[in-house]
Amino acid sequence: MAVFVVAHGAWSAGWAWKKMHPILRTRGHSLITPTYTGLGERSHLARPDIDLDTHITDICQVLEFEDIKGIILIGHSYGGMVATGVADRARARIAKLVYLDAFAPRDGESVFGLLPPASAAQRKPGEGDDNWRIPPGPMPPDTPEADRAWCDPRRTPQPLKTFEQTIKLAGEPPMPRHYIYCTRRPPDDRFRRFHERAKAEGWGSYEIDASHNPHITNPNGLADLLVAIAKQP
């Protein structure tokens, strides 16, 4: 049995992986989907000083207090920043690192530094009391209406410092790495560069017929890939 732990994307939370739990369970695997401080059901804890380190610590604390070892850590989208930091701090607990259409940062990089300049400018909030919150970005246009109705009310603003703070790493993650690239791309294809890096550096490299949230729009296809990764040495 593989144990998958998710570092979820921005504006999201553990709830977004609801479809994946029964699918992986029926295949004999376990899925753990913590929520970061200040998002989802923990949005009542939101405050201006929450940063990338806060979210990395959130996941590290789950691994520590649940005493989970040999996990497959999944970083989705912004969660690739978080998962990279967790893999750096909790190396002994992680067997494999999977980036799902995600940022795969090097030391000293931030979300704002990795986004195309126009996208970074759009994400930065204006003046006012809420200038530390980034409003949720839009769901991909091919998201079914029923899924939009489920997701949109649950998506919460992202603390600004999580996108501003640069990641500090002791070195490259030592465990096997894999990259799952979603092929239904918007014009602003911010993740292809990481997919190309994965192929160039010999990581496991895969494609899935889905837009940015396959755990919502193509959960069975994503489960197939995750189970295949779990079976690899």
Image (cartoon, rainbow, N blue to C red):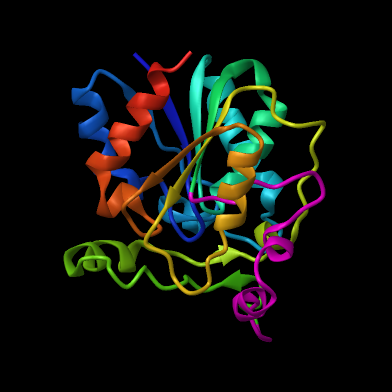
* Residue nearer the viewer, 195 or 118: 195
**Residue 165 image offset from top left, x and y in percent:** 75, 56
**Residue 173 image offset from top left, x and y in percent:** 69, 29
The image quarter containing residue 120 is bottom right
The residue sitting at 65% across, 30% down in the picture is: 87
User: Residue 114 colored magenta?
Assistant: yes
Q: How many marks?
A: 0
* Residue nearer the viewer, 200 or 35: 200
The image quarter containing residue 86 is top right
* Residue nearer the viewer, 37 or 146: 146
* Horizontal relation, residue 189 to residue 104: left or right: left
* Horizontal relation, residue 165 to residue 46: left or right: right
User: Residue 38 colored magenta?
Assistant: no
The residue sitting at 21% across, 33% down in the picture is: 23
Q: Looking at the picture, does residue 11 appear above or below residue 203?
A: below
The residue sitting at 36% across, 68% down in the picture is: 140
The image quarter containing residue 207 is top left
**Residue 114 image offset from top left, x and y in percent:** 69, 61
* Horizontal relation, residue 65 to residue 209: left or right: right
Q: Looking at the picture, does residue 131 appear above or below residue 228?
A: below
- The residue segment tinted magenta is 101-128
Magenta stretch prevailing secondary structure: loop
